[in-house]
Amino acid sequence: MRQASELRQHSSVPLEEVNLLELAPVRTAEWKEVGDRVVVERPRPTGSGIRGLWKRASYHLAAPRIRLDACGTFAWKRFDGRLTVREVAGELRERFGESAEPAEERLGEFVRLLWHGGLLSYPGW
């Protein structure tokens, strides 16, 4: 897997080939705090053709809002482009201890899901 520092100028490199732990994600979805949790609004899909139709149908079949758990809320608030996923994982470990383990793997899967859902972006990709 390539390091993000090697690829920073190469946005044509597929994101799947990049070490996501070295990237600093940015929130792209609307969100609000409800009590002690973050609720993320799923963006309405755009596009045309079969793929656009599929995305719109999928959007209507799923919940329009996602209520994050305590770890997800903690991480989401830090996805502002300043901290890498690895740094956020370290903070998760400090805050939640053993309940966050394995922190890098859990957070890596979380950001992959958010990215595929259009809720996060990685500047440069």
Image (cartoon, helix red, strand yellow):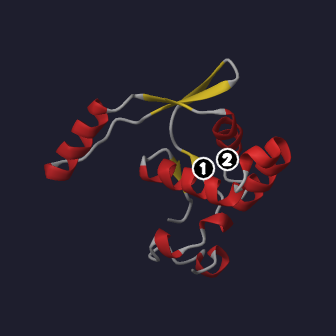
> Residue 9, how many percent across, how many down?
57, 77
| Residue marked by disc 2 | 80
Identity, as a three-letter code, of the amino acid under mark 2: Asp
| Residue at 72% across, 53% down | 101
Distance between mark 2 and mark 1 Cα atoms:
5 Å
Q: Secondary structure at mark 2?
A: loop
Query: What is the secondary structure assignment of the residue under circle 1?
Result: strand
Specify which label sits upstream in the sequence, 2 or 1: 1
On the rendered structure, is 103 left or right of 67?
right
Packing grade of label 2 (10 A; few <14, some 14-19, many >=20) is some
Q: Which mark is residue 36?
A: none
Query: In terms of image quadrants, where is residue 102?
Result: bottom right
Residue found 40% across the figure and 36% down from its top:
43
Furthest toward the front, the residue is: 98
Q: Residues within 10 Å of mark 1 (few under 14, many from 20)?
A: many
The picture places residue 41, in percent across and down from the top left corner, at 47, 30
Give the x, y percent position of residue 100.
73, 47
Please report contact status of discs 2 and 1: CB closer than 8 Å, yes or no. Answer: yes
- The relative height of residue 3 versus residue 26 in the rendered view (above or below) is below
Instruction: Tell me the amino acid under the disc marked 1.
Output: Val
Residue 86, horizontal then vertical, whole percent: 72, 61
- Of 48 and 112, which appears nearest the observer? 112
On residue 26, the disc is 1
Answer with left or right where residue 89 lies relative to residue 45: right
Q: Quadrant of residue 83?
A: bottom right
- Residue lying furthest left: 49
For the point 56% across and 60% down, the residue is 123
- Depth order, front residue of 97/78: 97
Which of the pair 35/4 is nearer the observer?
Answer: 35
Q: Residue furthest top?
A: 35
Determine the image quadrant of residue 63: top left
At x 63%, y 53%, the residue is 107
